Each structure stands twice: as structure tokens, then as C-alpha cells.
Amino acid sequence: MSDSLPSSCPKRPLSFLFTLALLFYSFSPAIANNDPHLPRVISEQIMQLREFIAGYAQNFVGIEYRHGGGSSATGFDCSGFTSFALNEFGVKVSPSSAMQSTQGVEVSFDNVLPGDLVFFGRRGHVTHVALVVKNTEEGVFCVHSTCSRGIMVENISTSRYWRPKIMFARDVITGQALEKCLLESPAQNEATLRMSPLPSQSDEELSPECTEEYKEMCASVAPLAMLKLLDLPQQLNGSAAAW
């Protein structure tokens, strides 16, 4: 009697299953695009939207930090600022940095584009968020509302304070742009609000993260009494947008 299988039986069941698995992984968008380190393909229109958002956000450089603030009339905290800038272009994100860190999709820090959000913290706890302005060979430049110097643009890749605290980055723009066709610019007169008088934060209680930032970023540069001055960002940095 022959030990061979009948011709109607599959002789390579494992090979057949492996082929099916390859096809599934190849054609499943959710899985194929799940790797944040893969090259990003961005349309020209969405890239233009990203440039608009990054450029618009820089109009508010110089406005001082305000805990819980979310408008140019009262000042911004970090997540209030990113939420405000994105919302002006129809990109809806939470005003909370912890919630923003769960929105959109994760992207590799090396592959960030203008408009992406970079999150900072320690021991898995998000404490700060910044919006990417540009990613060059010199590093990743972000605009963010800092406790010590207000809204400013800086190279976080070379910052001794921020670089060690970088956790991850997320794209909150592409998905919403494709879904809503977001290509409109915000009102041009919004940028003029950056010159509005802001309340002093001298009596405001600082969070532990802000207290640490003040000490590390400012104590060696200026006397602590100067930290209450509204024009401190200009005194410390000159023109923060001149990078």
C-alpha cells in the first residue's frame, strides 16, 4: 500500500497558510502603516497645510506663559497653545497634553514634519508638548509655550534641557486633513492679538515642572527677580524667531 496522500489533499498546508498571512499583512492598511519608522508619504496640499500651521503658530512668539491659558489675550500653557494653533485650521485636539499624546498616530522623531506634536516627560508621564516648525540636518525646531520664557522657537535636538525629556511624536494633522479637507487659512488679523497686554504671573503658583524649568533655564542667565518682567524673552533671546 502506498503511503502517499490522495491527490485531493493539500501536500503543503503550512506553506498555504504562510502565503495567506503574507497577503493579509501586505494589503491591510492598518497593519502596513503601523510602523512609525516607515517613510511618510504626504501630499503637497497637506504639506502646505502643515507649513501654514507652523508659520501661523510662530506669530505668537513672545507671549508669556499662563497656566491653563488658551488664548492670545490671557497667555498660553503648552497644550493650550498647540490646541489653539491647530484649532485655527480645523484640526481638533484636546487642550490637555496628556490627551493630545493619545490622539493622531505616532511617528518617529527622526521623521517629524511641520505641525507634528512632540511630547516631553519622564518615567512615562507627559509634562510638556511642542509643535514642530521644521526638521533639518541641524535638528528639530519647535515652537512651544515654556514656563520660563513664554512662547519661543528653539532647536530641541540640541537643547540640554529638552533633549533628554523627549518621549515621542504624533501626527494629529494628516488623518483629520484627509477626512475634513482642511485647506483654509485662519483670519489674518488673529496674529495682531499677540501684542495685547497680558496679566502678570508673579502671584501664580508654578507646577513642579515649571519650577524646575525656571531654575535650569533661567537662574544662570538672569536674577530671579527678572523672571517677572514681561520683556524677559526679548532680553534673554533677542529675537526668538530669527533662527
Image (cartoon, rainbow, N blue to C red):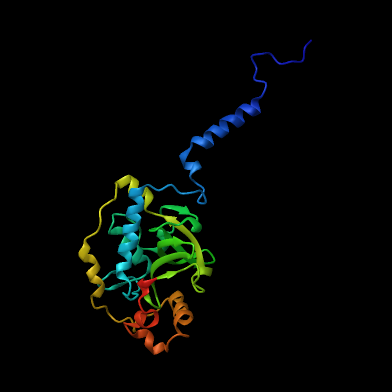
Residue 180: where, in percent of width, then height?
30, 47
Which sits in the foreground, 22 or 236? 236
Q: Which of the 4 image quarters holds residue 172? A: bottom left
Decide if residue 196 is on the left or right side of residue 227.
left
- The percent position of residue 209, horizontal first and vertical second, equals 46, 74
Relative vertical location of residue 87 with respect to residue 224 in this rendering, above or below: above
Where residue 139 sits: x, y (%)? 48, 65
Residue at horizontal 43 percent and vertical 59 percent from the top: 101
**Residue 174 visible from this viewpoint:** yes
The extreme top residue here reads 1
Taking 188 as reference, is 74 above or below it?
below
Q: Position of residue 200 (x, y in %)?
A: 30, 82
Q: If the image is split into quadrants, where does the C terminus sit?
A: bottom left
Vertical placement of residue 107 versus 202, above or below: above
Q: Residue furthest right?
A: 1
For the point 44% across and 56% down, the residue is 170
Viewer-nearest residue: 13 or 153: 153
- Please give left or right for residue 122 compared with residue 141 in the image: right
Residue 152 seen in this snapshot = no
Left or right: where 200 falls relative to 39: left
Is residue 240 found left or right of 14 in the rendered image? left
* Camera-nearest residue between 4 and 108: 108
- Quarter in which the N terminus is drawn: top right
Looking at the picture, does residue 2 appear above or below residue 159?
above
Quadrant of res 23: top right
Q: Tell me how many marks there are.
A: 0
Rendered image quadrant of residue 84? bottom left
